[in-house]
Image (spheres, rainbow, N blue to C red):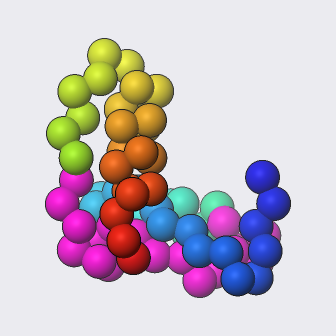
Amino acid sequence: MHITKNDKLLIASNNKGKVAEIKSLLSPHNVSDNKSAAKYDYPEPEENGQTFEENAIIKAEYYCYTKT
């Protein structure tokens, strides 16, 4: 995946610790204008998958169709 200057990145989490960790990991790559689900006060979808991967897909699809 290649992120360009005009792309938006939404961190699909309301967990402040997780958001801080992800932002820290992205900062060396000049990806700094990103927002979290908590910033927009979005509720999190129900994570009813059987695996971490299934829950990640549920969240990605949910936030993909949420207007920012």
Quarter-wise, where is residue 41 in the image? bottom left
Q: Which residue occupies the foreground of this view, 65 or 45?
A: 65
Q: Is residue 20 left or right of residue 47?
A: right
Q: Main secondary structure of the magenta part?
A: loop
**Residue 43 position in % (x across, y down):** 18, 60
**Residue 29 position in % (x across, y down):** 78, 70
Q: Quadrant of the C terminus?
A: bottom left
Quarter-wise, where is residue 18 in the image? bottom left
**On screen, residue 12 above or below 56:** below
Query: What residue lies at 22% left-to-right and 46% top-to-bottom?
Result: 45
Q: Which residue occupies the foreground of this view, 31 or 64?
A: 64
| Region of the chain picked out in magenta, as a range | 26-44
**Residue 66 position in % (x across, y down):** 34, 63
User: Residue 49: in sight, yes or no?
Assistant: yes
Q: Which residue occupies the foreground of this view, 11 or 65?
A: 65
**On screen, residue 55 above or below 65:** above
- Number of numbered discs visible in the structure rendering: 0
Residue 40: say if magenta. yes
**On screen, residue 47 above or below 29:** above
Residue 16: say if magenta. no
Q: Is residue 26 left or right of residue 52?
A: right
Query: What residue lies at 36% left-to-right and 37% top-to-bottom?
Result: 58
Query: What residue lies at 28% left-to-right and 61% top-to-bottom?
Result: 14
